[in-house]
Image: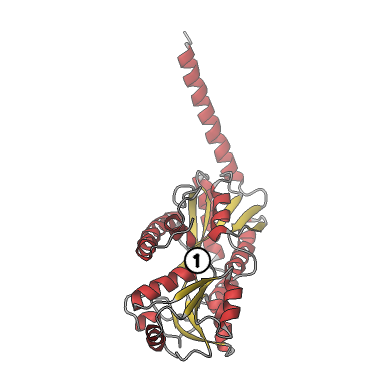
């Protein structure tokens, strides 16, 4: 006799089987329409530039347009949250930044979890920050800058593209490691901060390799890089760690999808991304601005994110940083 409980069990099993078939079919046909890549930063900056380079190659790899959607604001949280809460069908992905490692510790409340609500697809690139000062600065080396800051505790202004941004956290760690004090001036983006650096309205700024064009043209002075090794894009620029032992900051960019996205789709995404990062035209453009293409598996990105989150959580806690 078919009891009510038995009927419910049969129905549930049928529904599960149907979902598996539907999920498999979607994975088999993915992608069959354009994919939207959310960039959680305003258009025009280095992150947006890199995302567009990657999207261009992925469009070729996947046979569908990869459309850039800039959703900046709230320290990347607006764009991150949008993807975290999107349908896990493989048609909305995130061009994630290292803010995913720090936002959980920085913000008092997040409406998403970087590790639980986003599925890792693969790393795109790793890169150092460069320490820039105005030409009017008396410091021509990292050691000289540290001495300058110690002689003027709290008087030098350290600019950043926003509280909790990658450059800001690199600057915070620099102050902690070098045992100096500076006053933080958060700007709404890299461009206005750098505009004030050139004439000396601020005394220090940590930025990406794209800004090396300004030091090469003589508009500002670059003192060091934050990486463990000297960057091939600027081999004459010493690392900060050569002067301040133990200092090292490497930022990163990566692709994520909403959690619960089919593993088969994630695998397809990763395969396309790995191929895209091997394209010479993309590699050359990245390396010219000190970005190192760093393909990885989804599992490797997941482990990396957890380790990086632990690192920055400890630094943020020790610095007493918090954003409402």
Q: Residue at x 38, y 63 (%)?
A: 320
Q: Is residue 153 left or right of residue 7?
A: left
Q: Report the residue at 51% width, 72% height from top.
A: 185
Q: Residue 70, percent across and down?
A: 64, 59
Question: How many labels were placed on the picture?
Answer: 1
Q: Residue 60 appears at what percent x and percent y?
A: 64, 61
Colour approach in the figure: secondary structure
36 relative position to 244: left or right: right
Estimate how packed mark 1 is, as few (under 14), some (14 to 19) or many (20 or more) residues with alpha carbons within 10 Å.
Answer: many
Vertical relation: 182 (above or below) 6:
below
Q: Position of residue 101 (x, y in %)?
A: 44, 59
Say which residue appears at 35% left-offset and 84% top-offset.
Answer: 243
Extreme top residue here?
Answer: 1
Residue in front for this viewpoint, 151 or 175: 151
Give the camera-side residue of 19 and 252: 252
User: Who is closer to the viewer here, 203 or 315?
Assistant: 203
The residue lying toward the viewer, choosing from 109 and 299, is 109
Return the residue found at the far left.
Answer: 245
Give the secondary structure at mark 1.
Answer: loop
Q: Is residue 186 above or below residue 236?
A: above
Q: Is residue 248 visible?
A: no
Residue name at image x 58 percent, y 46 percent: 86
The residue to which callout 1 is attached is 165
Q: Is residue 260 visible?
A: yes
Image quadrant where residue 188 sits:
bottom right
Choose top left, top right, bottom left or bottom right for residue 269: bottom right
Q: How far across and down, in percent of the image, does residue 303 sit?
A: 39, 56
């Amino acid at each position: 006799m078919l009891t009510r409980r038995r009927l419910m069990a049969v129905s549930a099993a049928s529904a599960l089987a149907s979902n598996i078939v539907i999920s498999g079919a979607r994975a088999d046909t993915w992608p069959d329409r354009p994919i939207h890549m959310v960039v959680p930063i305003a258009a025009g900056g280095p992150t947006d530039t890199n995302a567009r380079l990657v999207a261009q190659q992925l469009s070729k790899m996947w046979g569908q347009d990869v459309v850039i959607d800039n959703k900046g604001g709230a320290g990347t949280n607006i764009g991150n949250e949008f993807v975290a809460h999107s349908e896990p069908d493989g048609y909305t992905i995130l061009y994630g930044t290292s803010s995913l490692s720090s936002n959980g510790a920085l913000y008092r409340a997040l409406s998403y979890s970087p590790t639980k609500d986003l599925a890792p697809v693969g790393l795109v690139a790793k890169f150092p920050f460069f320490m820039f000062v105005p030409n009017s600065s008396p410091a021509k080396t990292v050691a000289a800058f540290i001495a300058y800051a110690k002689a003027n505790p709290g008087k030098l202004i350290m600019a950043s593209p926003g509280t909790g941004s990658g450059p800001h956290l690199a600057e915070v760690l620099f102050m902690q490691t070098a045992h100096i004090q500076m006053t933080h001036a958060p700007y709404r983006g890299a461009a206005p901060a750098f505009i004030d650096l050139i004439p000396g309205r601020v005394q220090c700024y940590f930025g990406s390799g794209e800004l090396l064009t300004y030091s090469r043209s003589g508009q500002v002075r670059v003192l060091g890089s934050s990486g463990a090794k000297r960057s091939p894009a600027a081999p004459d620029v010493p690392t900060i760690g050569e002067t301040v032992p133990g200092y090292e900051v490497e930022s990163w960019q990566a692709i994520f999808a909403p959690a619960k996205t089919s593993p088969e789709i994630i695998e397809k995404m990763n395969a396309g991304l790995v191929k895209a990062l091997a394209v010479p035209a993309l590699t050359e453009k990245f390396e010219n601005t000190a970005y190192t293409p760093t393909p990885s598996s989804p599992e490797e990105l997941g482990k990396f994110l957890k380790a990086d989150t632990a690192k920055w959580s400890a630094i943020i806690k020790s610095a007493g940083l918090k954003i409402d």
